[in-house]
Image (tube, grey):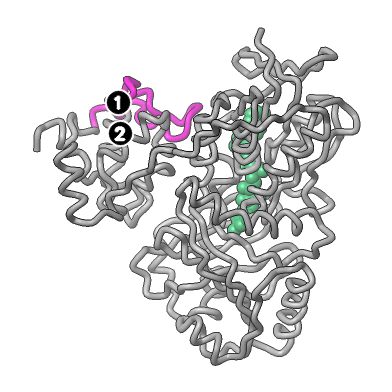
Amino acid sequence: MFTYDVAVIGAGVSGASTAYQLGHYHVSAILLEKCADVGFGVSKANSGIIHGGFHHPVSSLKAKLEIRGNFMFDKLQYELDFPFRRNGILVVAFSEEEMATVRKLYEQGVANGVRNLEMCGRDRLLRLEPKLNAEVIGGFFAPSGGTIEPYRYVFSLVEAAVRNGVNLHCDFKVEQCENDGEAWLLTAADGRRVRARYVVNAAGLYADEISRLSGAEEFTIHARKGEEYLLDRNSKARPERVIFPVPTKHSKGVLVIPTAEGTTMIGPTADPADDKEDTSTSSDHMARIVALVRQMVDGISVRDVITSFAGLRPVLDSEDFYIAPSEKVPRFIQVAGIQSPGLTASPAIGEYVKDLLKESGLTLTEKKDYQYDLPRHREVRHESLEALDRLHAENPAWTHLVCRCEKISEAEIVEAVRKGHRTLDGVKFYTRAGMGRCQGGFCSARIMQIISRESGIPLEELTKKGGDSRLLAGRLGELPVQTEMEAGK
Ligand SMILES: Cc1cc2nc3c(=O)[nH]c(=O)nc-3n(C[C@H](O)[C@H](O)[C@H](O)COP(=O)(O)OP(=O)(O)OC[C@H]3O[C@@H](n4cnc5c(N)ncnc54)[C@H](O)[C@@H]3O)c2cc1C
């Protein structure tokens, strides 16, 4: 049986970023993910903010990695081409009491070494963000903060890793981790096995289970739920900057987020959850969130909400990240408790884990022939009319729109399927098809037909997100038989 140098368990931002780093070296590595696609854990359900490095004291590991991670995003975006904007963060106060907290946060940011933080009075804030409620009294501006499309970021990291030799197994739920003295034997729920000298435990909400299965440290990951509400892209309330209130004990507060892809999001809540799979949302919480954000931006209305989702933060009692070699078992790196700002910190998490692997004895020789040239991801919604004509001449599927809300063409969906995304959610997160106003009401049937045609998976076996989430159990007759393209329209 082949023995890999490293097996990374979990393909969220932490595992994907580790795999991306390992792709730069002459090592054999494999990324194991229990879901049908990568990034389907908490990494797909968050606020998508690249934080500014002022919320946590730099004595914590999460602040150190947040600051380094933030800094690493420009180079990463240049190489990997995912949606990311440094549109800046405003932290705002509406009373003298809040202003005292704002000053403390600003001073913490300065002490953390964050550059270019600027204290602002009311007038400057309103110039920086005209959508802000005019009753604001002061705050600060963090220009290095920004927004990112988190799923495209994970896909890009994994594509780069795979292009550079890292293997990927999805639908691989690690259920046993045994050490035979020389290597780890990881067995999946379906009996498949992978052998590796080093293991990286980046299993998010289930990192405690993987640690226990491996005979490593005992700890508990608590889930803290965050509900988010997405507004229509035409909402007049969309600000230019990310707007933060003063934080609470357990969260950064309820925010107004102009997403990297042109919509607006409000949230998240921060409530303990008993069930690690409970991603339900409630209308009571929506009403509470809308009321809170209207204190910061007047025009936000419940009528603009087009959908909601929830993510569960994986939280340790220490409230910090736990990234360290196990002290109980050999060649086992723990990457646990990666709550917010895990997305921001993720490039630095991958780098840190790579260094820990090296310190634990893994030989890392840099590749001279690292492949930087990822094929560009074409999106017709960003193309000029001339470019569209050229694309149409190449293949008419480029100008055949399937998702009209988000303007996604059939060719983009075909590309996603050919890259291995074979669930409705996988295609949605890869392309944005189904993420607009109608939430897939008009295009899901067409997308399913294209997935089936391109992958050879019968329609009745297609799933929303893998496992038992079959879409059409007994409802095949409800689908139109052909796509318009297939019908020659
Ligand atoms: C509501 C909300 C808002 C947030 N907003 C922000 C933000 O704006 N900015 C920011 O920086 N951070 C934010 N975060 C935090 C950020 O999303 C997380 O820190 C980050 O996504 C954690 O990534 P991860 O890779 O560690 O975990 P995950 O993404 O959960 O990845 C772990 C993976 O392991 C897999 N797995 C689990 N068990 C097994 C097994 N047995 N075998 C194989 N695979 C397994 C899972 O399926 C999963 O894909 C937010 C979080 C939430 C919940």
Residue range corresponding to the magenta coloring: 453-478
Residue type (three-letter) at the residue carrying disc 1: Glu
- State the residue in front, 356 or 481: 356
Name the residue tied to disc 2.
Answer: 414
| 425 relative to 109 in the view: left or right | left
Res 330 → quadrant: top right
Residue 40 position within the rendered picture, expressed as x and y whole percent measured from the top left: 54, 39
**In the image, is 30 to the left or to the right of 101?**
left
Which SS class for mark 1?
helix
Between marks 2 and 1, how big is the CA–CA gap?
7 Å
Residue 401 appears at what percent x and percent y? 22, 46
Q: Residue at x 65, y 38 (%)?
A: 18
- For the residue pair 171 and 415, the one nearer the viewer reads as 415
What residue is at 66 percent from the left and 7 percent from the top? Answer: 1
Give the residue at x 51% y 61%: 283
**Secondary structure that dominates the magenta span:** loop
The kind of secondary structure element at disc 2 is: helix
Quadrant holding ligand 1?
top right
Q: Is mark 2 within 8 Å of ligand 1?
A: no
